[in-house]
């Protein structure tokens, strides 16, 4: 004889609240305040895992037990007259493959970024590549669960660098 138990109603989880993601374009103005970079044009690159910053004159050094790096950047595209010297803690040294499959060992730093109304810490690799069309690539790890990317639009969150 079969047990005749009353069927228990299925317990449903409370519906998850959907996080509303901020829309961004395929390129945006960002700020890196701890590096004293008020405005730099970044290409949103979902093909890149980690964000990258074109830097030159990389000079690693130690301060106590902390590995640090000093580097220069030209924050404005096609303008080598403005130079910003930055200093940051080194959090890692990683092998990175670029879009052409070339492997390069890069210093990794962690610093806050501001994009629109959002500020959060991201990891950035430093690369000496004059051929980069954009001074900064914003990789998918930095974007994850924060933004919805519209590849047909540019500068949705900031219309120009004066905004920053």
Image (tube, grey):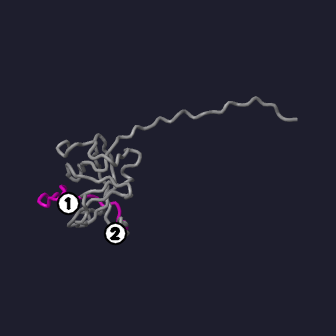
Q: CA distance from mark 2 to mark 1?
A: 19 Å
Q: Position of residue 130 (x, y in %)?
A: 22, 66
The residue closer to the viewer here, 89 or 2, is 2
Q: Secondary structure at mark 2?
A: strand
Q: Position of residue 26 (x, y in %)?
A: 31, 50
Residue at horizontal 70 percent and vertical 31 percent from the top: 8
The tally of labels here is 2
Quadrant for the N terminus, please: top right
Quadrant for the C terminus, please: top left
**How many residues crowd mark 1 within 10 Å: few (<14), some (14–19), many (20+)?**
many
Q: Which residue is mark 1?
A: 73
Magenta highlight range: 71-95
Residue 39 versus residue 129 in the image, above or below: above
**How many residues crowd mark 2 within 10 Å: few (<14), some (14–19), many (20+)?**
few
- First in sequence, mark 2 or 1: give its number: 1
Toward which corner of the image does residue 21 lie, by quadrant?
Answer: top left
Task: Say if the magenta span includes residue 75.
Answer: yes
Residue 105 is labelled as 2
Toward which corner of the image does residue 71 lie, by quadrant?
Answer: bottom left
Residue at horizontal 29 percent and vertical 52 percent from the top: 111
Instruction: Indicate left or right for 64 with 47 as reference.
Output: left
Residue 10 versus residue 106 in the image, above or below: above
Q: Secondary structure at mark 1?
A: strand
Residue 58 is labelled as none
Secondary structure character of the magenta stretch overall: strand
Instruction: Indicate left or right for 76 with 21 as reference.
Output: left
Residue at horizontal 24 percent and vertical 58 percent from the top: 135
């Amino acid at each position: 004889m079969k047990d005749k138990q009353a069927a228990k109603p299925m317990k449903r989880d409370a519906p998850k609240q959907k996080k509303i993601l901020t829309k961004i374009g395929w390129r945006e103005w960002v700020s890196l305040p701890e590096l004293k970079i008020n405005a730099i044009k970044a290409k949103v690159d979902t093909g890149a895992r980690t964000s990258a910053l074109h830097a030159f004159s990389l000079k690693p050094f130690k301060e106590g037990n902390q590995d640090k790096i000093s580097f220069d950047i030209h924050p404005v595209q096609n303008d080598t007259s403005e130079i910003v010297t930055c200093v940051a803690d080194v959090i890692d040294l990683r092998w990175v493959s670029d879009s052409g499959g070339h492997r390069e060992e890069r210093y990794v730093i962690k610093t806050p970024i501001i994009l629109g109304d959002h500020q959060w810490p991201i990891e950035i690799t430093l690369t000496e590549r004059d051929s980069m069309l954009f001074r900064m690539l914003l990789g998918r790890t930095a974007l994850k669960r924060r933004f919805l990317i519209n590849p047909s639009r540019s500068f949705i969150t900031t219309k120009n660098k004066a905004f920053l």
